[in-house]
Image: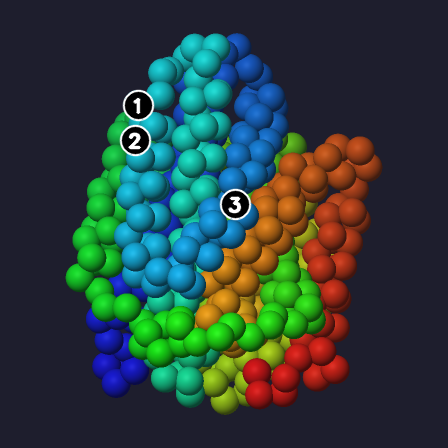
Amino acid sequence: MVRFIKFQNIAGIIANMTECFVGALLVFSLPFLAQDIYIDATKNQEVLNNLFLIGLSMWSYPLGGFIFGKFGDRFGRRTALIIIFFIMKIALLLFILSPKKSDNTPYWIFSAMSLFHFGSGAEINGGAIFSLEHSKELSQGKISGFICFFSVLGILMASCGVSIFVYLNQSCWDLIWVGFFSLVISFLLMLYAHETPIYKKTHRQKSRKIQTISLMVCFGVAALFGVAYYVPFVFLVQFIPSISQLPQESILLITNIALVVYMLALLASGIASDKLGLKQTMRMGALALICLSPLALSLVMNNEIWGFIIGQSLLAIAAGLFIGPSHALMLNLFPPQLRYQAVGSTYTLAVTIVGGNTPSLLRWFYCQTESIFPVCMWVLSWGLIVWVLLSNKWIMTRL
C-alpha cells in the first residue's frame, strides 16, 4: 500500500471522503430535523418533503460540476478544490444558522443544500481526479477502490454519528458542526498538496475533441452509480419506515451493516479491476444488480428486520462491485485537457437527473401501483443499459 499511495493520493481521497461525509450527514439528519423545518406536517408529509428537498436542491449539482470542471482544467485541480471547500463551508454555516420552526425555514434549508450541492458537484470528481492523476496507471483501479471505500466510510461515519446523537437524545443540529470542521481539515490539506503532474504537462497543449460515445458511457455509468447508491441508502432508509412498523432509528442502525458490506465490495472490485480490467469488472457489477435486485427488493419489502438486512446487503454487494472501479474508468474516457469538465458535467448531470430523483420517483411509482415491480424495473433498466454501453463495441478494450 505504501508503494502506490502517497500524500497527494491521500489528500484527494480525504477530499472525496469529506464531501460524502457531510452530504450524508445532511441527508441522514433530515428525518430528525423535520419537526424544526416543516410546521404542523404529518410523518408522511415530512418524508415526502425531505425526498423532494433532496431531489430539488440538486439542481445546482451539475452547475457546480460544469463551472468548476472548466475552471479545474484551466487553472488546476488543486486551485479548484480549495475554492470548492470554501463554498461548502459557507453552505454548512447557512444550514446551521437557519431559523427554526418558521414559515421560511424550508427556504433557508433549500438554499443551504443547493449551495452545498453546488460545491459537492464540483468536488465529487475533483478529489477523485486529483488522487488518480497522482497514481500509476497500473494501480488506478485499486486507487479508485480506495476512493470509494473511504467515501463510504465517510457515509458510515455520518450514519453512526446521527444514530448516536438520536440514541442520546441530542440535537442533530449540533452534529452538523462536526461536518463543518471536517471541511476545514480538507481545505487545509489541499492547501499543502501539490498540483497533479498530468495537469502540469498537458493543460497548455491543444485540446482534443471529446467523443460522443465517451460522454454516453460516462452518463450511463454515473446514472447507474446514482441508482445503485440512492435505492438502498436513501430511498429505502427514508421510505420503509413510512409503510411498515419498522422505526426510523432501527433502519438507520441496520443501514450501517449494509454500508460495511458496501465498503468491502467497493475495495474488492477496485483491486480486482487492475487484473480483470475496469470495464469487465463493472459489467459484472451491472449484471449483479440486474440479477439480485428483484430478490433483494422483495426481501426488503416484507416488513421484517431480517428481510431488510439481507435485502439491503445484497443491493450493497451488487452496487459495490459496479461502483468500485468507476472513477478510474470515467477518468480514462477523456483526455487530461478536458477531463475535469467532461467527467464533472456528465457525471453530475446524470446523478441529478437519474440518481437524485430516484427516491421521489420510486416513491411515486410505489404509491401509484402499491407494487415493487416498477422499482425493480427502474434498477434493471439502467443495469441493462450500462451493461450494453460497457461492451467492446462501444469503448476501448484497454479499459
**Are the two marked residues, 2 and 1, in contact with CB atoms closer than 8 angstroms?**
yes
Q: Residue at x 19, y 53 (%)?
A: 188
Q: Position of residue 195 (x, y in %)?
A: 28, 68
Residue 284 vs residue 216, the one in the foreground? 216
Residue 131 vs residue 31, the one in the foreground? 131
Q: Secondary structure at mark 3?
A: helix
User: Alpha-carbon distance for marks 3 and 2?
Assistant: 21 Å
Q: Circle 1 is placed at which residue position?
A: 97
Q: Residue at x 33, y 74 (%)?
A: 200
Q: Residues within 10 Å of mark 2 (few under 14, many from 20)?
A: some
**Residue type at the position of mark 1:** Leu
Q: Position of residue 343 (x, y in %)?
A: 53, 63
Task: Indicate which label's residue lies in the foreground, 1 or 3.
Answer: 3
Q: Circle 3 is placed at which residue position?
A: 63
Mark 1 or mark 3: which comes first in sequence?
Answer: 3
Q: Residue at x 73, y 48 (%)?
A: 375
What is the count of numbered marks? 3
Q: Position of residue 289 (x, y in %)?
A: 66, 64
User: Alpha-carbon distance for marks 2 and 1?
Assistant: 6 Å
Q: Which mark is residue 93?
A: 2
Compared with residue 126, is residue 139 higher up or lower down, i.e. above or below? below
